[in-house]
Image (spheres, rainbow, N blue to C red):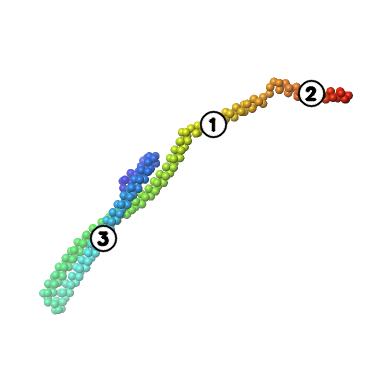
């Protein structure tokens, strides 16, 4: 049992190492469960054998008890026959003595077998307790293994994603994007500056603007000439 405690204590002691080496505890636990199942089969076989011996011994003890009681009954019948004068007294007592001797032998055997049966029954109880404990342990570790596999799968996926993110960062992609962003912002600022420069007025533009449009003056002069030609007073 200490093997499995050590395996699952790994996670409590160092979670990161457990995630990095998750396959090892899984394989170790699977092998441990297989070993436990082998132990369970052997324990159940031993339990069945001891239980069979216990049952057989108990039956033999009960059988000898019955035989002892039967020989006692026969001794009583023999003495009764002698009392009824249907059997010679000497023969009746001789046979009754033999019957009582048989009774004593079977009684002794019954007591001995009963003691052996009790020992076997205690062994059966102990073995049954061990079998139940192994079954419970197997069930617990199978549940723990299911959890461990789920953690391993999650850890593997997380590790893969983190590795991909690390790879993206290490390849300079983010740095390249930042440089491109700075370049675009620089170009945009430069374009805006050129635009502002194009809208600035020269000194000539300012003078003409102050005097009025040259086209308007020329049109007024032409209109005055036309009126003079036509004799229209201004």
| Image: 160 above or below 39 | above
Q: Residue at x 75, y 22 (%)?
A: 211
**Where is residue 206 drawn, in percent x and y?**
71, 22
| Image: 100 above or below 37 | below
Q: Which residue is mark 1?
A: 180
Q: Residues within 10 Å of mark 1 (few under 14, many from 20)?
A: few
Q: Residue at x 54, y 31 (%)?
A: 180
The part of the image, by quadrant, that contains residue 208 is: top right
Q: In front here: 143 or 63? A: 143
Q: Residue at x 62, y 28 (%)?
A: 192
Q: Residue at x 20, y 64 (%)?
A: 110
**Where is residue 196 drawn, in percent x and y?**
64, 26
Q: What is the residue that sits farthest to the right in this orientation? A: 231
Q: What is the residue that sits farthest to the bottom in this orientation? A: 85
The nearer-to-camera label among 3 and 2 is 2
The nearer-to-camera label among 1 and 3 is 1
Q: Which residue is mark 2?
A: 218
- Can I make out residue 63 in this image? yes
Q: CA distance from mark 1 to mark 2?
A: 55 Å
Q: Secondary structure at mark 1?
A: helix
Q: Residues within 10 Å of mark 3 (few under 14, many from 20)?
A: some
Apparent side of residue 196 relative to residue 101 in the rendered image (left or right) = right
Q: In front here: 213 or 72? A: 213
Identify the mark nearer the N-term, 1 or 2. Answer: 1
Q: In front here: 147 or 124? A: 147
Identify the mark nearer the N-term, 1 or 3. Answer: 3
Which numbered circle lies on residue 121? none
The part of the image, by quadrant, that contains residue 217 is: top right
Q: Which residue is mark 3?
A: 52
């Amino acid at each position: 049992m200490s093997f499995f405690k050590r395996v699952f204590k790994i996670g409590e002691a160092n979670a990161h190492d457990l995630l990095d080496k998750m396959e090892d505890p899984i394989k170790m636990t699977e092998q441990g469960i297989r070993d436990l199942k082998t132990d369970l089969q052997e324990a159940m076989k031993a339990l069945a054998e001891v239980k069979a011996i216990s049952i057989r011994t108990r039956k033999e003890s009960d059988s000898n008890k019955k035989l002892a009681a039967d020989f006692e009954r026969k001794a009583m019948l023999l003495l009764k026959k002698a009392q009824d004068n249907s059997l010679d007294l000497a023969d009746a007592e001789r046979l009754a003595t033999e019957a009582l001797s048989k009774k004593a032998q079977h009684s002794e055997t019954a007591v001995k077998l009963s003691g052996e049966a009790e020992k076997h029954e205690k062994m059966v109880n102990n073995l049954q307790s061990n079998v139940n404990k192994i079954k419970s342990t197997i069930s617990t570790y199978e549940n723990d293994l299911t959890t461990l596999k789920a953690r391993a799968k999650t850890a593997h996926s997380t590790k893969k994603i983190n590795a991909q993110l690390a790879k993206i960062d290490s390849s300079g992609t983010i740095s390249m994007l930042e440089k491109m962003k700075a370049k675009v912002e620089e170009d945009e600022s430069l374009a805006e500056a050129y635009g502002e420069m194009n809208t600035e007025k020269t000194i000539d533009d300012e003078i003409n603007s102050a005097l009025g449009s040259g086209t308007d003056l020329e049109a007024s002069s032409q209109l005055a000439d036309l009126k003079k030609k036509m004799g229209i007073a201004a």
